[in-house]
Amino acid sequence: MSLDNLQKIRENFIKEIEEVKDLSLLEKIRVKYLGRKSELIDILSSLKNLSIEERRETGVKANELRKELADLIREKTEDLHYKYSLIQPSLDITKPGKKAEAGHLHLLTKVEEEIKQIFLSMNFSVIEGPEVEDEYHNFDALNIPINHPAREMWDTFWLLRNQKEIRNPKSEIRKSEKLLLRTHTSPVQIRYMEKHNPPFQIIVPGRVFRYEATDASHEINFYQVEGLMVGKNVSLANFKFVIEEFFKKFFKNQKIEFRFRPSYFPFVEPGLEVDIRLDKKSQWLEVMGAGMVHRNVFDAVRYNPNEWQGFAFGMGTDRLAMIKYKIPDIRLFYSGDLKFIKQF
């Protein structure tokens, strides 16, 4: 009786599978004939109730049928996949390929490079230095000794480390190994002067850090470019010429207006701030702090202040980019928003 059932199962299966037109119906047939509750599985489960001779014959035939049905389902599946791909091809070989999207430089990188190229054209050298600084180079050597009120101008990220101080027997200047994230790029100027003799003219671009609340015009890290020119006869007249030439080239505006105002910075004397106005209708914009290098700074690097003099200046790369490209919020530079970055 079991052999007759097997033959009937095969005939019904062949008839049904020939009429299958889609994969969902094929799956239903698979479950019907090969699933755990199928008639074929019931026959295999009932073999224990048959005699040894019947068990041997029926078991072989049932397993052969199960393999045959599984093979036919696999072949039908492949056939349906092929027919479906002809009707709805997954790959159109005639369709133009997608152009690979290349990355590009960040706007701040572009602006910094433009600033470098302008100063290089005026015979300045580009110098870089460490972002992790010691207290001496960041403050003391720049005429900002410990407990000086001017230190409040720079909200500092201090780094935890064993602290010790070094005193040079030939100098009263205190040297501290207390570490911090540099608050400006001026310490790189100190490091340069410690190893080089004047005359020279350099710029120092780089990232700086301030511990302060963020808003549309303030960030905890941003980019600066500072400059220094030292020589025997360097004056504010030289500074005025260099800076006016720089801003005319940077903004591509020969009619830009300049305003120089007295100000205070501990490492220069006299100190001043530079304002610009791009046209008659626009407002004045503060863009730079500067001045003649303080004699105490020259003392710290063993320059004779009676023989050498120079000017120093500093400006924010982010601020110049915001002015040039009319960007309202400094935080956009660091947001990682591709919609913003791809505009430039």
Image: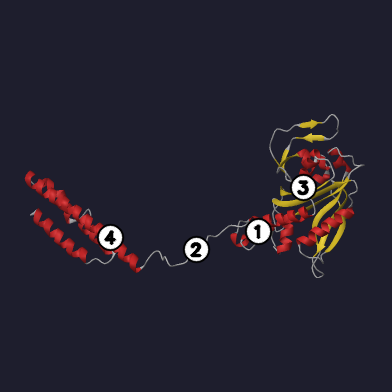
Residue sitting at x 77%, y 48%? 125
Front tag of 3 and 4: 4
Residue labelled with disc 2:
98
Q: Which mark is residue 154?
A: 3
Nearer mark to the viewer, of 2 and 4: 2
Q: CA distance from mark 1 to mark 3?
A: 23 Å
In the image, residue 70 sits, relative to residue 129, either above or below, namely below
Circle 1 SS class:
helix
Q: Are marks 3 and 4 in contact (CB under 8 Å)?
A: no
* Amino acid bearing label 1: Leu
Residue type pointed to by label 4:
Thr
Q: Residues within 10 Å of mark 2 (few under 14, many from 20)?
A: few
Alpha carbon separation for disc pair 4 and 1: 54 Å
The residue tagged 1 is: 332
Q: Position of residue 281 (x, y in %)?
A: 80, 70
Q: Are marks 2 and 3 in contact (CB under 8 Å)?
A: no
Write down the quadrant of residue 75 in the picture. bottom left
